[in-house]
Image (cartoon, helix red, strand yellow):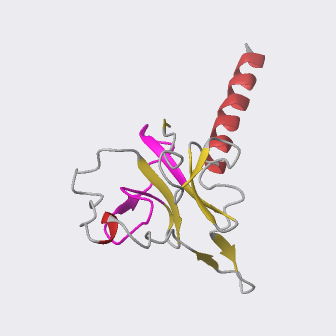
Amino acid sequence: MKAVRHLLALVALALAATTASAQFVKGNEAVKVVPDGTKRVETAPLPATGPIRSTKPCNADAGCNAGPWHMVETNEGLVECTEAYARPGTCRKSTYGTTKLSRLWVVKSGTNWLQCQFPDLGSKCVNMFARPPANLPFDAVQ
């Protein structure tokens, strides 16, 4: 019985560590720590052309998001947004680890902005600015 309790405690610790470590994407080049120790974060730029430049964004609290939530690292930490560009009003505090939602992870790798299925560059990732259908992302409930 003591061994079972010990095993359950180890499993609980492992799950907590997994949840905590997935609060960012390892290798996300959008996040840089500068010499003074502060963190500087880039967000994906709007496309040079297209309807997104002239349409009103869906605010995070408006109930208009019909697709997956975009997990974006910002200077304020990890947030979930209605779009990959994290425009003002489109993001809210992350519920990752407490609420199951359809999600995509917005990551910079080199000069490319990617949408990844999981918080892992080894998961299914697509270039956000590729021509359709190559830019269609693979979301997952997580």
Seen in the image, is 100 located left or right of residue 21?
left
Q: Residue furthest top?
A: 1
The correct choice, above or below, for 136 with respect to 5 in the image is: below
Find residue 91 and report its image quarter.
bottom left
Residue 111 placement, left or right of 117: right
Residue 17 position, x and y percent, is: 68, 43
Position above or below: 119 against 15: below
Which quadrant is home to the N terminus?
top right
Q: Residue furthest right?
A: 3
| Most distant residue in the bottom direction | 36
For residue 90: magenta?
yes
Q: Residue at x 51, y 50 (%)?
A: 135
Magenta residues span 79-105
**97 lies above or below 3:** below
Where's residue 51, x and y in %? 30, 64
- What secondary structure characterizes most of the magenta part? loop
101 over 72 or under it: above or below: above
Q: Is residue 83 magenta?
A: yes
Give how far across and how far down residue 107 sits, in percent: 59, 59
Determine the residue positioned at 66% across, 47% down: 120
Q: Nearer the viewer, residue 124 or 90?
A: 124
Residue 15 quadrant: top right
Residue 114 occupies quadrant: bottom right
Report the residue at 48% width, 45% height from top: 133
Q: Residue at x 43, y 73 (%)?
A: 48
Residue 68 at x, y = what percent?
A: 40, 45
